[in-house]
Image (cartoon, helix red, strand yellow):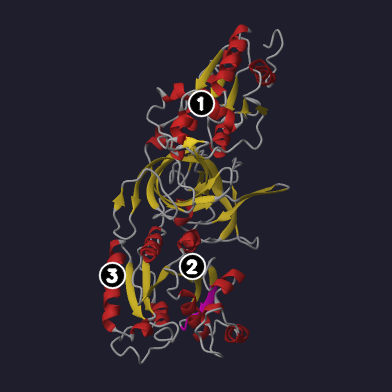
Amino acid sequence: MLRVIACGSVDDGKSTLIGRLLAGTGGATEDQLDYARRTRRGGSTIAAGAVDYSLLTDGLEAEHEQGITIDVAHRFLDLPSGRRVVIADAPGHEQYTRNMAVAASTADVAVLLVDAGKGVREQTHRHLTICALMGVRAVIAVVNKLDAVDYDQAVFDKLAGEVLAAATGLDMAADVIPASALSGDNVVEPSPNLPWYDGPTLLGALTAWEPSGRARTPAEYRLPVQYVIRADDFRGFAGTVAGAPVRPGDPVAVAGSGVESTIDRLLGPGGGPLDEACPGTPVTVTLADDVDVRRGDLLTRPGALAPAKAYSAMLVWTSEEPLRHGRSYLLLAGPQTVPAMVTSVRGRLDVVSGKQLAARTLGLNDIGTVELATDTPVCLDGYRECRDTGSFLLVDRVSKETVAAGMVRHALRRGRNVVPHAYTVDRDARQRLKGQQAKVLWLTGLPGAGKSTIANAVERRLHAMGLHTYVLDGDNVRSGLNKDLGFTPGDRAENVRRVAELARILLDAGLIVIVALVSPFRTDRAVARSLFRAGDFAEVWVNTPAEVCARRDPKGLYTQAKAGTLPNMTGHGQAYEPPEHPDRVVDGSASLDEVTDEVCALFGWITDDPR
């Protein structure tokens, strides 16, 4: 089977071209063709009774109404050679680049369209770059709409040169074909309108395509475990084979733990035994030994792949909200899901020039090189070695939005050399010595809400009760540990991350930790909470009216923000996201003693002997 992605900038004619291919190869039914004859979009220039071939691929109602492609549409056709082809019609609009990237991740060949009248555009370069990153090594460029420029060979030659230069720079093999999808020139049959061209049609190029042998796959098999099957005395591990064939009797290891065994039986989709399973085959394996294997584990040959906690990767950023340093995301790689954060942006790729540009963050549709760290070790291949086990998604932990598609470049050495050491004197021992339960109290609210004042009052009361405490105040921390951070959303995320990690260390020391931090974003606070066990962490929203905060203005921040000299001021130019489910809400304009009582009551610090 040949998997093809049709891509290019918006309105370059992808849907019409695919429709022509389908109609010319018997891939469209008479009902579909009849519908395409009878239906007209608003503003259509197609003559009455003629087929609007673009309607053969657009499946969503919004696509029919707007005349654009939004989601990826998959269509099937059979080549004269007998090969089955799956064509993915990818959207050309920038806002739907994420959909295009998904389609490219499984493609063998890219059919890249270029409008003869508009030329090679930035989105053309972006799509070509994404295809290269996704491992597509062959591109068939179609200079479309040549009828609009009177089939001018000079126009074709100029655009063909630009595309070939871009493809060569991305290490892609490229052919360029002149065509007019609307008129049917050179799509299925050669056209008399192109007497100066003696190459293949688009259909001919697809028929002649053969794998180049440049694709790199690991020498060993990979089997990500998607499901553990238990029934009576049967225990099998289901997944889809990747990399290389697997056979009964092959040695096997759980990549994370290193525990080894041998593949006993190999069962196919129908449950029957197999002598061999090739990549792409769903299988169930049983092992010769009783080995602890769970969903998300990776089975492979012993020593073939080592887990790591840090990787270098390429990201295609797909969210309107930019990448934030220090923010924890969920990394999804096959059946694995682990918390991860981007620790460094090494550069952003200029899709037109191909150069790496300096960057601190990534925005919508940006492509960049990053370093990321996971909370727990994961087993990932380089994407060039194996697509299936070298790709991942980053997902926002609160909104669950997919924010990036990632391709692993390689594991970082530090990701394999850091091993936590377990000490005999632990948190429980320290708590017993102090005679108290360690907790983290996180105060959040607008600047001037009274967080530091409340934190001071709470600590004074706990100190008087003989409890061991420490306050992490926003300004105090920024005077030392976080003095290198500003007030952009990314720097704020990193500020919260560092304070949360420090609070976790102090909690482990057996202390009661009081954090007084604006921490304006819900996601960052949710990540901070996730570091702690249930019952160890309490979020208190100091909900002081904004006008009271501005009137207090203890540091003159509101005055500066109003004068325009303080950008990124929370509550004045930068949003504050109130907690949705805080453990306690207090009014910072109320009596300090009353507020202190409310806060202390959270953990029962109100008796004569709260220990």
244 relative position to 604: left or right: left
Asked whether residue 23 is drawn in magenta, I would say no
Q: Nearer the viewer, mark 1 or mark 2?
A: 1
Would you name the residue on which mark 3 appears?
A: 162
Up the image or down, 227 lies above or below 569; here it is below
Label 3–label 2 contact, CB within 8 A? no
Q: What's under tag 1, amino acid-wise? A: Asp
> Which is nearer the N-term, disc 3 or disc 2?
2
User: Measuring 54% from the left and 85% from the top, which residue is drawn there?
Assistant: 26
**Residue 250 visible to an observer of this rendering:** no
Looking at the magenta stretch, what is its main secondary structure? Answer: strand
Q: CA distance from mark 1 to mark 2?
A: 53 Å
**x then y, percent, for residue 39:** 60, 83
> Which is nearer the N-term, disc 1 or disc 3?
3
How many dots with numbers? 3
Secondary structure at badge 2 equals loop
Secondary structure at badge 3 equals helix
Label 1–label 3 contact, CB within 8 A? no
Q: Which mark is residue 553?
A: 1
Up the image or down, 607 lies above or below 92; here it is above
Q: Which residues are magenta?
A: 75-80
**x then y, percent, for residue 125:** 36, 64
Q: CA distance from mark 1 to mark 3?
A: 59 Å
Q: Residues within 10 Å of mark 2 (few under 14, many from 20)?
A: many
Q: What's under tag 3, amino acid-wise? A: Glu
Q: Nearer the viewer, mark 1 or mark 3?
A: 1
Q: Quadrant of residue 289?
A: top right
Would you name the residue on which mark 2 appears?
A: 90
Q: What's under tag 2, amino acid-wise? A: Ala
